[in-house]
Each structure stands twice: as C-alpha cells, then as structure tokens.
Amino acid sequence: MVDMAERFQLRFSELLPERYSNLTFKFRHTATQRTEASAHYFTTGLFGRYTANHVWYPQALDKDPILRFYKLCDKWRHEVDDNPNSLNELAKFKKTNDAVEMTKRVSRRLGLDEVLPYNDVHSMYIACTFETAWTPRIPSPWCSLFTKEDLEVLEYSEDLKYFWVDGYGYEINYKQACPAIGDMIQHLTNTTLPKAVFYFTHSGTLLKVLSFLNLYNDNKKLTADNFRQNKDRKWRVSKIDVFGTNLAFILYRCGDGDKVLTMHQERPVTLPGCPQGELCPLSRILELYGNSVHSCKFNEMCAYSVPS
C-alpha cells in the first residue's frame, strides 16, 4: 500500500500534495483491522510515517452504507450470500470430468493411492496463492503440485463462486451498489468537497461495483458446463480482484468540458459506453449511471420477506 500510494502521487502530483490537510484529503475505512491497516499504510506512502499517524478519519462503521452496503441488504444476504443454491454451479463443476481428473492428477503427484476430495485440493491451491502473494520471490511448495491445466480448473471454480455471489450471476448483486456509485458521482460533480477522496473497503464491495459499471462482463452466465468455452473470459477474479485491488476515478477540467479517467489496478480502463482509449466526458458518465443512481431505492430493493 505504501508503494501504491507513492505511485499515485508520482502520477498525480498536483492532485496529491505531500502535505496533509483534511480540507484537501478525505479518507475512510470500514470497522475492520485490515482496511484500517490499508488506510494507514497508504497515507504513510503519501505523507510519511509521522503525518500518517495524525490523519483524521470519520467513525468507522461495520455496516457502512457506502463502503459495505451489502451488509445492509437483507435480500442479498438471504437470497444469495446465505443461500446454498447460489453455489449450485460451483458444486456441479466439482463433479465434472475436468475437476475430477484434476484431483486425480494431483493425488498421483503426491503418491497417494486414493483420490483426494476436491475441497482438500482446493485448500492446497489457496495455500499456493497466499504464499505466492506474500513471498513472490520464493516459490511455494504447494504450487509445485499443480500444472497450468490444474490451475485453470481451480481458477475457474473461484470465478464461478464470485460470479454468482458478487458478480453478474444475480441482479441484486450489482444493483445494490447504486449508493456507492452515487457517492462517486457526487464527488465528481460537487466542487466544494475535498478534491482527493480515498475509501478502503472489501473484495465484496469492489466486485459488485465493477459489475454495476458493466466491466469484465462476458454477457453470458458462467456455468459448470461451459468451462472450456470460457477460456478467454473477462471475469477472472485472479486478475480483477487481487490483493490491494484499487479502482480510481480522476476528474480533469478540460477546455471542452469535464472528463474522467477511470483506472482499475492502476491501469486505465474504458467504461462500456465511453469512448475507447479516451477520457470519458463527465456528461457521458452521468448519462450511463445517472438514472440508476437517481432511482436508487436501496431500502426497497433490499427488503426481504420471509417466504410463507
């Protein structure tokens, strides 16, 4: 996070001065240790260790209506997050020939007579991914168990899970992100607010927001039986939702009108409906998302009635 902050400051030095002021900067995180730590180390990268200890934050909320809106969405929690049916495609995929053969290959490499259950192999995969993230220069022993073919199978299982729980699988997943998008638009259009706003939140938030923005949309459902047809899919959690995932909207005051640069993982991305490879006019952003924001009836959308 320190390095990321320094990179942002190098790219946008006029927007991100090294001197901290709560009139210029606004920081906010959820009531969790990990987002608080992310905020602290990011501000350390911007201002140095001493000043980072004196940055002001509003009271952190566990159920933050902007940073963790899904915690307040009863419909999503009951019908998706706590509903085993949301993982039906994942459960079916574990029984496909591709998944079964993968577990056999891994079991053979371990010298086992019996085939390991899929979930055990998946745990090894998770160990491989975490150790690689923590110490990228030291090869993880767990990773040596897998071939590229094995990793593609395991990666698809992760993509299936998050597609249905946080992505395009169910409409409620992304529609409930309208308060977060509304907050973004408010900061882009209101010149009296701090000019540099940083939120530190969670994977579940970012995936829903990305889906609301229609990014990484393959325009078809990910299912257990179309693994091989989806080798070139856009929805790939290992790329769009890595550690330190970040999404940024930078406003430019141009002679021909205000324009917005959208960045994901520190790289420019084109929002669907915006000019390819160009800054997107703010007016176009408002056309694309304004109606959804203005008609955002979060409480009504997220109301849940117990089936009779």
Image (spheres, rainbow, N blue to C red):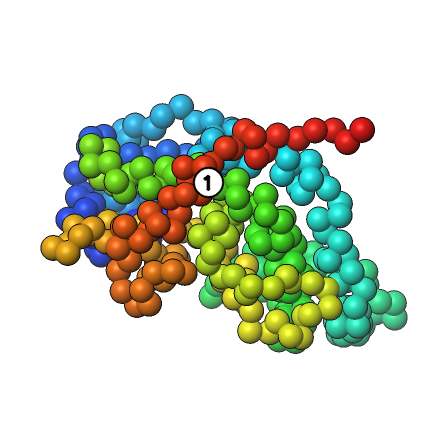
Q: Nearer the viewer, residue 267 or 32?
A: 267
Above or below, comparing residue 28 to residue 141 in the picture: above
Amino acid at pointer 1:
Cys
Give the quadrant of the C terminus.
top right
Res 28 visible: yes
At x 78%, y 60%, the residue is 92
95 relative to 229 in the view: left or right: right
Q: Which residue appears farthest toward the left when viewing the image?
A: 255
- Spot occupied by residue 273 in the image (x, y as percentages of width and height): 38, 60
**Residue 2 visible to an observer of this rendering:** no
Q: Which residue is mark 1?
A: 178
Q: Horizontal placement of 119 versus 274: left or right?
A: right
Q: Residue at x 35, y 41 (%)?
A: 184
Q: Position of residue 280 (x, y in %)?
A: 28, 58
Q: Where residue 250 sits in the image (x, y, percent)?
A: 27, 50
Above or below for 222 versus 47: below
86 or 156, which lies in front? 86
Left-right relation of 288 to 227:
left
* Residue at 65% over, 58% down: 160
Q: Is residue 237 left or right of residue 221?
A: left
Find residue 150 and report its horizontal and vertical position in percent. 67, 72
Question: Which is more toward the observer, 109 or 122?
Answer: 122
Residue found farthest to the right: 113
Query: Which secondary structure, mark 1?
Result: helix
Residue at figure coordinates x 23%, y 53% from the top left: 259
Position of 21 relative to 243 (above/below): above
